[in-house]
Structures are given as structure tokens and as C-alpha cells.
Image (tube, rainbow, N blue to C red):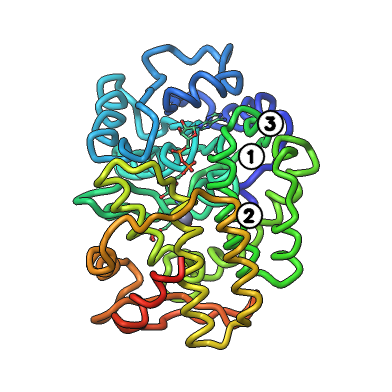
Amino acid sequence: MNNIIFTRDIRADLQLKLADFGIADIFVLVDNNSRNFCQRSFEDFGIPEEHIITIPEGEHHKSLESVAEIWQVLSDQGARRNAVLVNVGGGVITDLGGFAASCFKRGIHCVNIPTTLLAQIDASVGGKTGFDFNGLKNEIGSFAIPDWVLIDNHFLATLPERQIMSGFAEMLKHALLADEEHVAEAMQVDFAGVAEEDFLKLIRKSVAVKAAIVQSDPREKGLRKALNFGHTVGHAIESVAIRRGLDIFHGDAVAYGMIAELFLSVQKLGFDEKHFEAVRKFIREKYPVYHPVAEADELYELMLHDKKNEQAGVNFTLIHKPGEFDIDNYCSRDEIFEALKQI
Ligand SMILES: NC(=O)c1ccc[n+]([C@@H]2O[C@H](COP(=O)([O-])OP(=O)(O)OC[C@H]3O[C@@H](n4cnc5c(N)ncnc54)[C@H](O)[C@@H]3O)[C@@H](O)[C@H]2O)c1
Ligand SMILES: O=C(O)C(=O)C[C@@H](O)[C@H](O)[C@H](O)COP(=O)(O)O
Ligand SMILES: [Zn+2]
């Protein structure tokens, strides 16, 4: 956590942190929206226009082509190994930029300035980077902890409501991994206040849940699989959505995935059924109605590619009760098909 700064004055903190890098060249990675809405964090810093790399927004561009574009600019502009890439944007930008920085000349400096709720509480911290490949989520990637993460929730003022809810799904995931009280607090959040100073405390609390898990298992040998709760099913849904151009965000898919995986938790680990119903009701009310995106077979086939699988079958993180989880639960095809019907 000591490379994460929570601030309400991003310009001042960024200036301070960039000064640490001395004479190194600074590059900035943005997408069209973060460039439009978040440029104030680096304008007037004298960063040459050729050092600002803009890619189109959206998961569709979390691709090898975008990574190549970043490397092309860094290379054409003669970036040295002491250069810094500042990623300003949502999780797509921090994942792509983090990966590009971790490989360029075998690794340049990297600073994350997350500008979506999802990136502030999850994607920008913990060092997972990468891009989608062969129709599979995050199929290629590296673990690379950024030098700094600067989190200022003023940015959330321009974030569309659906994107706030997408990010909130990961906050709910962290709450379920933390304790009962955290879940109750999360389910009463006032979404109108996400850009207010008070909300920064909730962001900090959510990041603390992730940071503690990452610290104990940075490379996902075991415990970190907990942070993948909801993602076994969620990533399968999201992969189909990407293939078919459906309007389902990462957090939506994780929310649907959490319903299915909480159902498995009820069946296999005795998670309280009433609590499951309460979370399902909350998700059904707050997220777009789920229409099955594919036959269960297609989703199951995608789940077979999940990175948590270490033997034949599909591996889930399941929850006994908020704060008590169990990694490495292999579930049968029939159990998974039944769980998919619950969304
Ligand atoms: N590395 C990790 O640990 C980790 C964790 C969770 C999710 N992820 C990844 O993160 C991605 C999802 O991240 P996301 O939800 O931030 O998506 P995103 O990066 O696509 O951003 C969502 C949308 O918000 C726009 N946007 C960004 N900042 C804005 C602002 N301040 N105002 C208005 N619009 C703004 C973006 O242009 C985009 O259209 C997925 O690819 C997911 O796999 C990674
Ligand atoms: O940080 C982690 O660990 C996570 O699993 C966080 C997830 O929210 C995130 O979506 C992550 O990118 C998923 O990683 P993957 O290894 O399943 O691709
Ligand atoms: Zn996620």
C-alpha cells in the first residue's frame, strides 16, 4: 500500500512524484474519454504532444494492436529505460499501459492514475497487467507493480452511472471477501456522492482489502485467487460479450458471475441462502437485466480456459460467509449449468 496515494489534489501529487524521476522522459497513455475529461492532471507539465499516446476507448481495444501502438510511440520517440509511462484512464488503460511498460526495454517506470471507480479500487493496484487475446480475457499479461498509484476521486464526477455501477461490482466483491459489516455498508452506498471527499474513505477501504491479499500472495499461487471471486463465470460472459459486441461491462459480468458463484457457495459451502437472495436482489435491481448471452456449453468451454484451473475442470473461489472464503473448488459441469440458471 505504500506506493498508493489517495489525494484530492492530483496535479500537486503527480508533479511531486514525477519530480522523483528527474531527467527521465515522461509519456502519457490515455483513451479518448480520459483525455477529454482528465487532462487537467497533466496539462501545463510541458509534456510534448508526441509523448501523449491516445487509444480509442473500450474493452475492444484492450488488444495486442494497442500494446504495439504504445511500443511504437515509445520506440519512435526514443524512450530510454528510465522513461516513465503515466497511465491515465480506466482499467483498460492501466492494464494495457502497465503491460507495455513492463516489457518495453524489459521494463520502464510506470505510474497509474485511475479515473474510473473500477480502476481506482481494483485495476490500478496489485500489478496484474495485460490484454485480451484469442477471444479470451487477459490471456496475455504480466505481474508488474507500478511505481506509484495516485487515486483522486474528483475524476468520478464525469463517469457515466453505468460505469460507476460496473466499478461498484468489484467493491461488492471486496466487501464479500472482507466481512458482514463491509457488505452492509457497501449495499447502502450513496452513488450520487462518488466524487465527494467522503467517498474517498470507501475507496481506501476497498483498496485495503485487495492490497492485503495481494501482499500475501502477489503472484496468485494461492490466496490471491480470492480476488477472482465472480470472475470464473464473469469472464466467460464478458468474453462472449466482446465476441458479439454486446453492451456488457467487466463489472456487469462480474456482478452476474457473483450471483452464479454465490449460488455454488450456497450449494457447496453452506453460504446463507437468505444472504444469497439479498445480494442477488441487489444485483438484479442495480444492473442491466441479464439475458443469457450464450448456451451454457459455450460459457463452460470458456471457463475451461480460466487461469485458476490447475487440473482438468473448472476452479472456483467460493465463500462460506462474508470474510471466509475457500479457493480451489472444482465444480462439475452439472453444478455449473445449474448455477448459470440462477443469474
Ligand atoms: N488488473 C486488474 O487487477 C484488474 C482488476 C479489475 C478489472 N481489470 C480490467 O479493467 C477493465 C475494466 O476497467 P474499467 O471499468 O475502468 O473500463 P474502461 O477502462 O473501459 O473505462 C470505462 C469507460 O469509462 C471511460 N472513462 C474513463 N475515465 C473516465 C472519466 N473520468 N470520466 C468519463 N469517462 C471515463 C473510458 O473511456 C471507458 O469508456 C477490464 O478490462 C478488466 O479486465 C483489471
Ligand atoms: O487482482 C486480482 O487478482 C484480480 O483477480 C482482480 C480482478 O478483478 C481482475 O478482473 C483481474 O484482472 C482478473 O485477472 P485474471 O487473472 O482472472 O485475468
Ligand atoms: Zn475484475
Residue at the image position 35 percent from the left and 26 percent from the top: 55
Q: Secondary structure at mark 2?
A: helix
Q: Is residue 232 left or right of residue 226?
A: left
Q: Nearer the viewer, residue 319 or 54?
A: 319
Q: Nearer the viewer, residue 98 or 122?
A: 122
- The quarter of the picture where residue 72 lies is top left
To which residue does mark 3 refer?
154
Q: Nearer the viewer, mark 3 or mark 1?
A: 3
Q: Residues within 10 Å of mark 2 (few under 14, many from 20)?
A: many
The earlier-in-sequence mark between 3 and 2 is: 3
> Identity of the amino acid at label 3?
His
To which residue does mark 2 refer?
207
Estimate the x, y position of residue 262 in percent, counting from the top left: 52, 74
Estimate the x, y position of residue 104 in percent, counting from the top left: 30, 38
Q: Is residue 205 above or below residue 221?
A: above
Q: Secondary structure at mark 3?
A: helix
Q: CA distance from mark 3 to mark 1?
A: 9 Å
To which residue does mark 1 refer?
151
Q: Is residue 174 visible?
A: yes
Q: Is residue 129 above or below residue 229?
A: above
Q: Is residue 37 left or right of residue 186?
A: left
Estimate the x, y position of residue 112 in percent, counting from the top left: 52, 38
Whether the residue carrying mark 2 lies under 8 Å from ligand 2 is answered with no
Q: Secondary structure at mark 1?
A: strand
Q: Is residue 139 above or below residue 180?
A: above
Q: Is residue 162 above or below residue 305?
A: above
